[in-house]
Amino acid sequence: MALVPYEGPGGLRHFHQPLAAFSFADRAIRIRQNWRQLGVAAVVWDAAVVLSAYLETGAVELQGHTVLELGAGTGLVGIVAALLGAHVTITDRKVALDFLKANVEANLPPDIQPRAVIKELTWGQNLGLFPPGEWDLILGADIVYLEETFEDLLHTLEHLSGLHSVILLACRIRYERDQAFLAMLGQLFTVTKVYYDPERDVYIYRAQKRLPTEDL
């Protein structure tokens, strides 16, 4: 299935630039992009920029906390979380790992790099390698777009999160199926919209497992 993402009037031109430059956590961040080689996994999406900016506001505690990023792609969100003091596990499919690792190592100072671990994670597979409930914060930027991945993504989120874990998903609501995913998520978690960027048309949703008594 071909994926042609909606990116507004500017189209996809900026995805073909070899570098994308940002400033987060008082540091210049330069992310290498390679749309031609890896497609959607190798470019910086607006949702990643919005989620990184949201983390920078201090809306969630990062210093010393454990964070896991799903579908990290270029690694921008995980890089920002590490710069802000988190211990981050940055994950994606095997095909994207070398590219992801290069961006992480290029943008994290040597003293911070030990706090960022890169691991393979294909949703719904080999979840036993990731102890359930280990992470304080689970992040995903623009990972809600392929309907055939929704069940595996939900299963992965359910496995990874404990009652204390907070999930933050940044996404653009493009189609009815995206709303359907949020409805599916709401069957397992308490879901609230915590932020909206009107310029980029990106929402951030917070999800957290319900206490057993909440389902009675």
Image: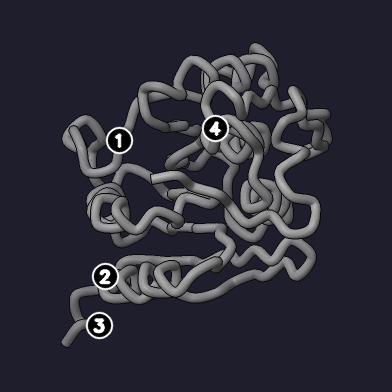
Q: Residue furthest top?
A: 110
Q: Which residue is mark 1?
A: 122
Is disc 3 surrounded by few (<14), some (14 to 19) or many (20+) residues within 10 Å?
Answer: few
- Label 2 element class: loop
Q: Which numbered disc, 3 or 2, marks the residue closer to the eye? A: 2
Q: Is residue 130 above or below residue 185?
A: above
Q: Where in the figure is residue 15, as x and y percent of width and height?
A: 70, 36
When the figure is inspected, residue 3 is found, relative to residue 194, above or below; the finding is above
Task: Using residue 75 as the reference point, say whether residue 119 is left or right of it.
Answer: left
Identified at 58% across, 30% down, the residue is: 42
Q: Give the mark nearer the N terminus: 3 vs 2.
A: 2
- Which residue is the site of mark 2? 188
Give x and y (percent) for residue 157. Answer: 31, 53
Q: Position of residue 123 (x, y in %)?
A: 29, 42
The residue that disc 3 covers is: 214
Marks 1/4: CA–CA distance: 17 Å
